[in-house]
């Protein structure tokens, strides 16, 4: 079974140092909308170029050539296609980068056309990019994690302590009345507005350990095996 099919039918599995796993989303590289307050200004930058370079620097401060990264969508905006898309990702430190499209997918579709049968693309002998669906499941050092571009109130393995990591809402859901309830459970937004720098797995585990385990479905902790 190839990697793309595996991400649909069974969870991915990774083991390693906690610091070697980074999670982030909604980088919006090169996003320069004609808004009164563009997204780069909201993030404290003076231009889209400055925002792009600043975010890449924030990633590389925590990443190494051993990093396994997860980018949960909305990576790039604007023109340029696959060359620009891969050029941006090549500026990041990583060994393997697992990416989803999100709902803004400039360059993503063109880049996907260049992947092999496993939806993988090798920048060089040391850097591999894995293209994944907008929802996938993964074990990191034995911890079950649901990753999705979009937030979910109910997810697989929730009653057994699995994590839910998402992007998309740019810090808005966290501040809402719904968010005040939802984020007491083991869900975390990892988009730039909520996490100016990517979070490593150790940081995520510390945050999640302070949250409640609660499920909104019929699965009970005694009968449910995460992703089993």
Image (cartoon, rainbow, N blue to C red):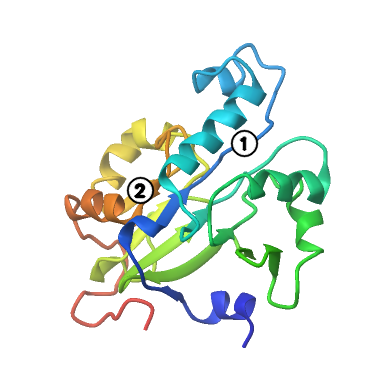
The residue carrying mark 1 is 28
Residue visible at 30% across and 52% down in the picture: 204
Q: Quarter of the image holding residue 216?
A: bottom left
Does the residue at mark 1 contact the one at mark 2 (Cβ under 8 Å)? no
Q: Nearer the viewer, residue 199 or 104?
A: 199
**Residue most toward the top?**
36
**Residue 224 relative to residue 113: left or right:** left
Residue at x-position 82% and y-position 41% = 80
Residue pointed to by mark 2: 188
Q: Is residue 55 visible?
A: yes
Assign a secondary structure to mark 1: loop
* Tally of numbered tags: 2
Residue 89 % position (x, y): 64, 48
Of residues 172 and 113, the one drawn nearer to the viewer in this rendering:
113
* Quarter residue 77 falls in: top right
Work out whether residue 135 or residue 70 is closer to the camera in this orientation and state it. Answer: 70
| Mark 1 or mark 2: whose residue is earlier in sequence | 1
151 over 218 or under it: above or below: above
* Residue 148 pos. (x, y %): 50, 57
222 or 129: nearer the viewer: 129
Residue 193: x %, y % from top left? 45, 32
């Amino acid at each position: 079974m190839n990697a793309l099919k595996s991400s649909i039918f069974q969870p991915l599995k990774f083991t390693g140092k906690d610091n070697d796993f980074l999670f982030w989303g909604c980088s919006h590289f090169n996003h320069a909308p004609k808004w009164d307050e563009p997204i780069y200004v909201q993030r404290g930058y003076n231009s889209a170029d400055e925002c792009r370079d600043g975010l890449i620097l924030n990633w590389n401060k925590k990443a190494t050539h051993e990093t396994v990264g997860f980018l949960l969508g909305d990576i790039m905006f604007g023109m340029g296609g696959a060359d620009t898309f891969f050029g941006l990702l090549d500026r990041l430190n990583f060994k393997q980068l697992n990416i989803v499209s999100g709902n803004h997918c400039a360059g993503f579709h063109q880049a996907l056309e260049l992947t092999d049968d496993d939806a993988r693309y090798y920048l060089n002998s040391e850097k591999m990019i894995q293209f994944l669906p907008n929802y996938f499941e993964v074990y990191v050092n034995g911890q079950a994690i649901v990753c999705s571009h979009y937030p979910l109130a109910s997810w697989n393995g929730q009653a057994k302590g699995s994590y839910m990591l998402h992007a998309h809402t740019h810090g808005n859901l966290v501040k809402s009345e719904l968010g005040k309830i939802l984020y007491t459970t083991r869900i975390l937004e990892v988009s730039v507005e909520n996490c100016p720098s990517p979070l490593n797995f150790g940081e995520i585990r510390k945050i999640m350990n302070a949250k409640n385990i609660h499920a909104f479905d019929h699965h009970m902790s005694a009968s449910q095996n995460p992703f089993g």
